[in-house]
Amino acid sequence: MSPVPADPPLPATESRPQPQSLADLFWSFTWLALQGFGGVLAVVQRELVEKKRWMTREEFVEDWAVAQILPGPNVINLSMMIGDRYFGLRGALSALAGMLAAPLVIVLALALVYAHFADSPQVAGALRGMGAVAAGLITATGLKLVSALKSNPMGLPTCIALAVLCFAGVALLRLPLAWVLLGLGGLACALTWRKLAP
């Protein structure tokens, strides 16, 4: 497997691209949400890190980890965190509205259409095929984010070990996700705390 290319250097924090207004935030997350059917993680990472450059890969990994721990859909949590970062509560609400408004209308329309064709074997087969593509998108995004772990205070070997343990716990042992997050997430926080302690 070829190595994952490193991010191009970002400009200084003061001149880093950022949302220009609440409307920019709303339409950016609307466009992001409209692309996110079945594999939103890949789309979020590409739009926020690679295209808009509102975040570095390291920041995305850190914020995504927090968004996963919080209750509710991960990408909704992340959008509200980013909106709040730039415009406070108004930004969080604008980002939330962008994530929900247009997709809600489309999903309701599709649900009405699906109700008429739910018993069709062809439709069921097509949806199973989409599931395989979604899994591939998530795997590809995870591999792209591995390079961000090089600058983690725990070091790359420890990060990889925790990632392997997490995969084994969730995919192989089928442990509850909440217990895996509490156990391995707590361990990772403690190890990082020790590394950063003066």
Image: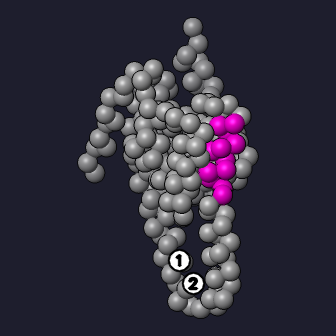
Q: Secondary structure at mark 1?
A: helix
Residue 132 lies in magenta, yes or no?
no
Which residue is disc 2 drawn over?
124
Q: Residue furthest toward the left?
A: 2
Residue 100 relative to residue 145: left or right: right
Q: Residue furthest toward the right?
A: 71
Q: Quadrant of the C terminus?
A: top right
Report the span colored magenta.
90-101
At 49% from the left and 33% from the top, the residue drawn is: 18
**Colour setup of the view:** one colour
Q: Amino acid at mark 2?
A: Ala
Estimate the spatial distance between the alpha carbons at disc 2 and disc 1, rounded to whole Å. Answer: 6 Å
Q: Main secondary structure of the magenta part?
A: helix
Q: How many marks?
A: 2
Which residue is disc 1 drawn over?
128
Q: Is residue 58 above or below residue 174?
A: above
Q: Residue furthest toward the top?
A: 198
Contact, CB < 8 Å: mark 2 with mark 1? yes
Q: Is residue 122 above or below residue 197?
A: below
Whole-percent x, y for residue 160 in the image: 46, 39
Other-residue count near label 1 (Cα within 10 Å), few / some / many at <14 / 14–19 / ≥20: few
Whether residue 15 is visible to the viewer of this picture, yes or no, is yes
Q: Secondary structure at mark 2?
A: helix
